[in-house]
Amino acid sequence: MRNLLPLFVGIGLLTACDALEQSQSQSDEVESTPYQIAEVQRRDIRVAVEAAGIIEPVTTVEVKSKASGEILDLRVDTGDEIAAGTLMAAIDQRVLSNALLQAQANLEVARARLTNAESQRERTNSLYEKQSVSQSEWEDSILEHATANSEVVTRKILVENAQIQLSDSNVTAPITGVVIERLVEQGQVISSPMGDVGGGTLLLKMADLGRVRVRMLVDEIDIGKVQPGVIAAVNVAAYSNRPFQGQVIKVEPQAVEQQNVTMFPVLIDIENVDRLLKPGMNAEVEVLVASRPQALSVPTAALRTQGDVFSAASVLGYSMDETKELLAAAPPLPVPEGGAAPRPSSPEGMTAEDAEMMAKIRDKFRSGERPNAQEMAFIRKMRGGEGAGPGGGRYGGGGRGAPGGPRSSSVASQFGGEYIVFTKRDGKYVPLHVRTGITDMDYSEVVAGLEENDEVLILPSASLVNAQEAFQQRMSGRMGIPGLSKSGRK
């Protein structure tokens, strides 16, 4: 047993050495390729804003009775679809009928008094002409006639009001719609809002369900992408395989706060012809902002801005000066259709000799050679200064378009821009200008600068790491995500 112990120890040491060498080999392999290679391919790119909401009617009416009394007949129930003008409830008319009879009787008395006043006035006028009565008696007769006439007008108004109140005892549907709520029962005594300071008794609620809407809350980060007129897809749990098409009709200007997150209410209008959507249903809404089927696309992680291109190039062994030279020699992007021409990367009035020199330098870069001092001075001259990048530093950051560029739509103002990618040319990976369109964050549409099946590198990006860290800090501060609390970060 003692003789076998050195053998076991030796085998263990050999195994440990092999494992260490294998681990070191794998580590060297990872360190030797600190990037990923991706191909430019065609794929569908969709940009949408998703949020949850509640189905609610566009038109809702509260039904009350102008007459007070007991409900003798209630003819509708929840879910009934009623046409406008249909009798829904009848209130006890006995008190109202008596009030109408009393008003009519008072009107007859007032008319009789007016007749007596007219006769008295005629007699007084005749005697006044003969100077048989004094002037004060004549004036009293005129005043009595006017008072009697005013009483008749007042009694007529009371009769008309009593007739209106009697007709109001029959509650009819104010709109064509569905009874969504019934708050009273037959036999219940109700009060009229005309004389009740509390607003009267609410009988029913009706809604027009032919057109409904979704009220959803959209985060302030995405609210800029949502505008009136944009098409939306609405899904409810009751009809999971049948999406409903809606349209954004309004973005509320006043924000609301939910769990320390600023949200904006957005209203989606939906035609509800089949009456399938009910008020109160939970809905999942997807507002389509932009769509590009089979668009030439590149991984968004491969895009670099002017600010982080040098750190990415250092991974490939390029110095800052070499990166500037490669960017200066890279072919310029075409002028976007309908947009302003990009700033030229060389002074105006370039001669044929200058163009020939530029082509010669570009060929040198592609073949892997370095330009001489004279050619380097020419490059700096064409760039118009040491620090300026190609096109005068016109690369956008954070997915924004070039400043001063065309903004033909809300999508154009939110997506796209000019970036830099590292792509394979003549067996070497060199920086190249590229213009992008819409992006779904994972992939970006290629508008100019790359072709299908081109290879691009996904290199480490300091700005990307910083942006992700800032986003995590912001979200942890808002919602308190476990593991991302502010106190736990170092």
Image (cartoon, rainbow, N blue to C red):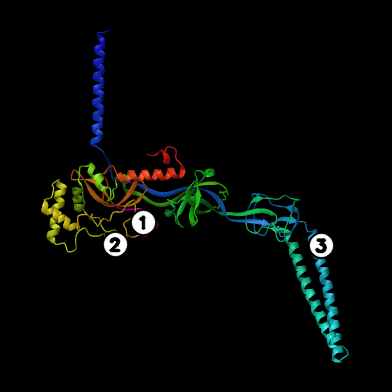
Give me the residue at 52% from left, 51% from top: 214
Q: In the image, is residue 6 above or below residue 436?
A: above
Task: Give amino acid for label 1.
Answer: Ala
Quick one: 346 or 17, which is closer to the camera?
Answer: 17
Residue tagged 3: 98
Give me the residue at 24% from left, 19% from top: 13
| Residue 68, x across and y down, in percent | 75, 58
Q: Distance between the residues labelled 1 and 2?
A: 15 Å
Q: Is residue 484 visible to us here? A: no
| Residue 249, x across and y down, in percent | 49, 57
Residue tagged 2: 340
Instruction: Please state if 375 lies on the left or on the right of 275 as rendered.
Output: left
| Residue 350, x across and y down, in percent | 16, 62
Residue tagged 1: 412
Q: Distance between the residues labelled 3 and 2?
A: 83 Å
Task: Give amino acid for label 3.
Answer: Asn
- Residue 378 lies within the magenta run: no
Dot 3 alpha-carbon crowd within 10 angstroms: few under 14, some 14 to 19, many 20 or more: few
- Read off the magenta span: 407-418
- The reply to whether dot 3 and dot 2 touch (C-beta < 8 Å) is no
Dot 1 alpha-carbon crowd within 10 angstroms: few under 14, some 14 to 19, many 20 or more: some
Label 2 residue SS: loop
Whichever of labels 1 and 2 marks the residue nearer the N terminus, that label is 2
Label 3 residue SS: helix
Whichever of labels 1 and 3 marks the residue nearer the N terminus, that label is 3
Q: In the image, is residue 23 above or below residue 403?
A: above
Label 1 residue SS: helix
Whichever of labels 3 and 2 marks the residue nearer the N terminus, that label is 3
Instruction: Please state if 69 lies on the left or on the right of 300 as rendered.
Output: right
